[in-house]
Image (tube, coloured by chain):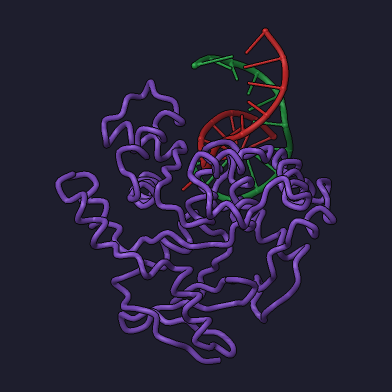
Chain colours: A purple, B red, C green
Amino acid sequence: MNNKFLCNSIEIDLSSTLDGGQSFRWHKFENGFNGVINNKPYFIFQENKKIFVEAEELNSNDVNLVFNYLSLDVDLRKISKKFKNNLYLNNLFKKYYGLRILNQDPWETIVSFITSSVSNILKIKKNINDLCVLNGEKIGKNKYDYAFPGPIKIIDFGENNLRKIGFGFRSPYIIDACKKVINGDILINNIYDLNYDDALHQLTKINGVGRKVADCILTYGYHRKDVFAVDRWVRRGLINKLGYSEKLQNEKLSIKARKKYGNESSYIQQYIFFSEKS
DNA sequence: ACTCAGGGTCGAC
DNA sequence: GTCGACCCTGAG
């Protein structure tokens, strides 16, 4: 085991970033979090105002990968400066500075956010980790060090087993996603290259993926910044703190906010979500 | 034990 | 556009 320096601790808040509802596979342990990126287990932790990553046989590629995953290339100061004349947003960035948007695997994000519908973070975590433990392959020594199952493995696992481990009405949706990825109906690696509307169109082909879930997938799985996912929490923030009309449906709110905030949409959305939920 | 709500979506009207 | 149904779980 060895570890490498990632950044100063002021630059990222591990708890809100890794365990704030973007990813569901990071588990707090002592001064950091255990989790899996690209089927390799890592421990990301804070010590003496510095953030480090630890793994077995940690090479420079791994460090770059983790750096990317945590979006440490994103300049938070630059984003927050743009909104320094908006009291509400300015305070949000001050209060939760260090909250970042993760750059996750598209497939894991698709399954995770289908699972998120009318659920809560605790239960989503339970579902996703149970799926990995029961169907995945062990890849490390920690309790949750399992590979995330691909579409073929999940189909093999089957709708009934998904229901047995608590996915409920989302089970057939996940199976539908598997089928459409396997038969090429959706090319998940090509979505990076599409414009927003086309990307939305591709993802919402999946049964159980509407605009909100698709927006989350684009934000967390494709690192798109021009996306404003509106759920019940973000809706409250937009209406109560930024003066949007409560008559607007979430889709309209998303369209308006996206238009207003452009490439800062995803970060504004994330800070609103986190503060409304806290 | 019982109620409630949680990062929505779908199909019927 | 609106409305009920869909599953399950932890919290109060």
Left or right of A128, for residue A235: left
Where is A72 relative to A110, above or below?
below
Image coordinates of residue C2 in percent, x first then y, are: 53, 14
Q: Quadrant of residue A131?
A: bottom right
Residue occupying the point 55% across, 44% down: A199
Return the residue nearer the eye: A110 or A157: A110
Image coordinates of residue A21 in percent, x first then y, are: 49, 54
Q: Quadrant of residue A49?
A: bottom left
Left or right of A274, for residue A44: right
Q: Residue furthest left?
A: A85
Left or right of A148, for residue A259: left
Image coordinates of residue A245 in percent, x first then y, are: 32, 24
Left or right of A163, for residue A102: left
Residue occupying the point 24% across, 62% down: A77
Q: Quadrant of residue A96?
A: bottom left
User: Total marks drawn?
Assistant: 0
Where is A135 relative to A88, above or below?
below
Image coordinates of residue A94 in percent, x first then y, are: 23, 57
Q: Would residue A273 be visible to someone looking at this image?
A: yes
Q: Considering the image in quadrants, where does the N terminus of chain A appear?
A: bottom right
Q: Would residue A166 be visible to someone looking at this image?
A: no
Where is B3 relative to A85, above or below?
above
